[in-house]
Amino acid sequence: MAMNIPGDGGEDEAISAINTTPLVDVMLVLLIIFLITIPVVNYSVPVDLPKERIEVREAKPEDVVISVDNQGGIYWLDAKVDGTQALIERLKKIAVLKNQPEVHIRGDWRSNYEPVGRIIYACQRAGIVKIGFITEPPARAL
C-alpha cells in the first residue's frame, strides 16, 4: 500500500508518503451520494405558485357581500350582524337555493384575521360552496 522511498534499504527507514487512494475512493462515493440525494431535496410535487395579477370578475346582483370593518364588526351588505350564529342562520337560508349565490368577503386590512375566519367557518357550517375575497389592486408605480 505504501510507496517505498529509495534509500539504503534498511528496515528502520520511515515511509514518508501517504497513500491517497482510499481518500479518493471515499470522496468519489460521497460525491455520488450527494448527486443522487440533491434532487430529492427539491419538492417532488409540481405546483404552479400563484403570480401577482389582477383578475377582474363581474359581480352578480345575487352575490352576498359580507364586510369586516377595522374593529372586527361583521356586516351583511350594509346591516350589522349580531354574532356568528345569526350569520350562520342567514347563510343557511341562501344555501338551500337552487342556484346558490357566491359569498364575497371584504376585509379591512387593519382588522384581525379572526372575524374573516369566523365568516369562513360560518359559510362552511351553512353549506356555502363558493366563497371569494374582494381586494383592491396594488398602486401602480409611476
Image (tube, helix red, strand yellow):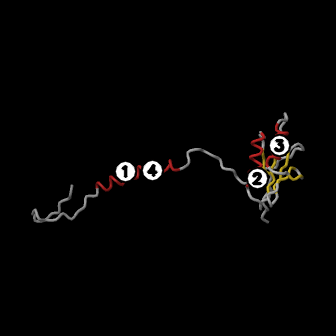
The amino acid type, in three-letter code, at marker 1 is Val
Where is residue 57 drawn, in percent x and y?
Answer: 82, 47
Q: In which quarter of the image is the C terminus?
A: bottom right
For the residue carrying disc 2, how many other residues have a C-alpha within 10 Å: few (<14), some (14-19), or many (20+)?
A: many
Earlier residue among tags 1 and 3: 1
Q: How far apart are marks 3 and 2 (CA)?
A: 17 Å
Residue 51 is marked as: none
Residue that mark 4 sits on = 35
Where is residue 134 drawn, in percent x and y?
Answer: 80, 52
Q: Distance between the residues labelled 4 and 2?
A: 46 Å
Residue at (84, 41) in percent of width and height: 101
Earlier residue among tags 4 and 2: 4
Earlier residue among tags 4 and 3: 4
Residue that mark 3 sits on = 89
Q: Quadrant of the N terminus?
A: bottom left
Check whether the beta carbons of the residues at disc 1 and disc 3 lie within 8 A of each other: no
The amino acid type, in three-letter code, at marker 3 is Glu
Where is residue 100 drawn, in percent x and y?
Answer: 83, 38
Q: Distance between the residues labelled 4 and 3?
A: 59 Å
